[in-house]
Amino acid sequence: MCGIIAYAGHAPAAPELFEGLRKLEYRGYDSAGITTLDRGRLYTAKRAGTVEGLRVDLNNLCGTVGIGHTRWATHGAATAANAHPHVYGRFSVVHNGIIENYSELRSELISAGHAFSSETDSEVIAHLLDVYYDGDPVDALRLTCARLKGCWAIAALCTEFDGYIVTRRGSPVILGRGKGNYAASDIYALSGRAEKYSIPEEGDFALVTPDKITIFDEHLNEVVRPFDILKSNFSEVGTDDCPHYMLKEIRENARTMRATCRAFSSLDLSAVRTRLKCADKIVLIGCGTAYNSALAGVRLLGGAYDCPVSAHIASEARYNPPRVTGRSVCIAVSQSGETADTIMAARIAREAGAYLIAMTNVGYSAITRIADFVLPVCAGAEICVAATKSYIGQLACFHLLSAGTSPSVRDCALENISKKVEEIALDDTYAPGIAKLCVQSRAVFFLGRGYDVDVATEASLKLKEVSYIFSDGYPAGELKHGTLALVDESVLSIVIICDGALAEKSKNAVEQILSRGGKVAVVTTLPPIYAALSGRVQAVWLLPEVPSHLSHFLSSTALQLVAYHAALFAGHNPDKPRNLAKSVTVE
Ligand code: M6R
């Protein structure tokens, strides 16, 4: 969603905040702003568009204390007026989350004579702070939060205090100590600056000056929260020699598989395996790509454990939760570990008695703090909004979890497959051609059976997300029950044929499409399919032959590349799809 950064130190604040915002920009990129504070005066710059637009303002932003924000619009268009920080009276505020009761609060404040300068839900926070301020900024923040409904991470400046205040409820914020005192929506923004970090508890307040961070609980009792050493050096997160994060991250698929294998081999999974073996059911929850990996998880875990396994979209499951008992296991899948719907659905399952496993790429995220066990997806920082290597890492996790014993790195089958994934990710022979067919088409269907249908579902999400081409992922056998009506020469069907047991059936789908004049591209690991369809369809990409249950690593990597090239042909930046944000911390 949005990204927040705050700094109090002895260096000029504006460049610190600007660099932090650049690292947070993947969270939201429709507008950005900074306020600094110098000797009781607020200096604010806000612009629609990317963080880069603020560069021209940096020299005008004085002071060594400040707050910054990069926005993903929820209330009000992406304009400079709606960009954060919102300034009212003595306060300037940045907010991540949603204030559900903002219209009541706004009406109340307008009746009391307040004038608003934006359409956002967030601006009420600045007004309330000014109303409740009586010499103590933290108390003003406590009183303000008591009026709010929804979720928030807030950082605010007050003209009468040389520092900033922070709080969170339901949205992430991390405090950092290093060359100054920081607060940020995620750890990437702190990398290279903070040496230690601390995650405040829900409802905590922090009073941050250039020399000190003081933390209070929700009743304003001063508390000590642990600060851990910030080990990972995310400051080196860049695109390497790739033109985009998306390509770089696809090329890290193989590394993710190997790192996840290594992490599993050093985990004590005995409690988890016992839970899974004795479970009356296993429920998997997630959103978007994480849900799509859960679909593969159903197949893999279903073959390994003697109980029903089901996948649930978290935004549905939280309102219509799958029934669980004290013997059930719930696996919440989330790259960021911050997705509001997934956290809520996971919390409900845990409260109903289920053993909660968080499968996440972000070790310090919110989901890890409510889980009984954390399964690490070792993808490293994933910056592109479209999930690629984290999906591959989630697949690897499901494989490792369904393996009978804890696999060592050496004999891990995934280790061998990862070499083939590496080769595919570097191959640009086939993906651009299939991508060109996509952009020349009115719609693209991804079809498959068995293991391949899960790949089709995720490949379709990837294509629509970065190329904006209409697409659907579909079981090939369902074609004749309705979808075939849409097939003509303007529609491309990409048929994935890697599940050996069902290959002939999938080939039938190709025949059905061809006989109706539809265009077909095939992605297969099976030489006989390649031989049978070469020359008869628009394109066939032959991948290395591997066992069916491992083929999704290869076919997914291939189709991620197709989506990437389709975005380029369509003239879009694949790293920042329109209307989307990386981390969906609102409901
Ligand atoms: O961080 P999460 O895995 O919980 O995020 C879930 C979805 O928002 C995410 O997978 C989204 O669908 C991606 N943009 C897909 O590429």
Image (spheres, helix red, strand yellow):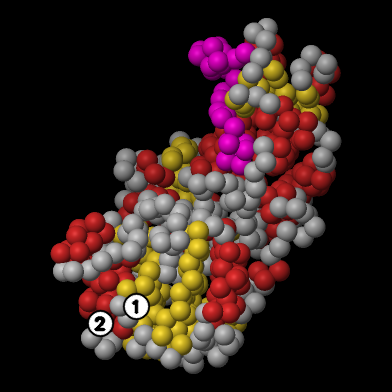
Instruction: Work out whether residue 60 or residue 232 is closer to the camera in this orientation and state it.
Output: 60
Circle nearer the N terminus (2, 1): 1
Which percent across, then down, holds residue 22? 60, 66
Mark 2–mark 1 CB contact (< 8 Å): yes
Residue 34 in the image, given as x and y percentages of width and height: 49, 72
Q: Nearer the viewer, mark 2 or mark 1?
A: 1
Residue in view at x 52 percent, y 52 percent: 581
For the point 33% across and 57% down, the residue is 119
Q: Residues within 10 Å of mark 2 (few under 14, many from 20)?
A: some
Is 552 one of the magenta-colored residues?
A: no
Q: Is residue 291 visible?
A: yes
| Name of the residue lying farthest toward the top | 515
Q: Up-down: is 273 above or below 87?
A: above
- In this orientation, does residue 447 appear? no
Residue beneath disc 1 = 91
Q: Amino acid at mark 2?
A: Tyr
**Residue extent of the magenta highlight:** 462-488
Taking the image as shown, residue 20 lies to the left or right of residue 540, namely: left
Q: Which residue is mark 2?
A: 133
Q: Looking at the image, which residue is at 83% across and 16% down?
A: 535
- Looking at the picture, does residue 494 appear above or below residue 291? above
Disc 2 versus disc 1: distance between alpha carbons?
A: 9 Å
Give the left or right position of residue 84, taking residue 132 as reference: right
Q: Considering depth in this image, is 406 or 40 the residue closer to the camera?
A: 40
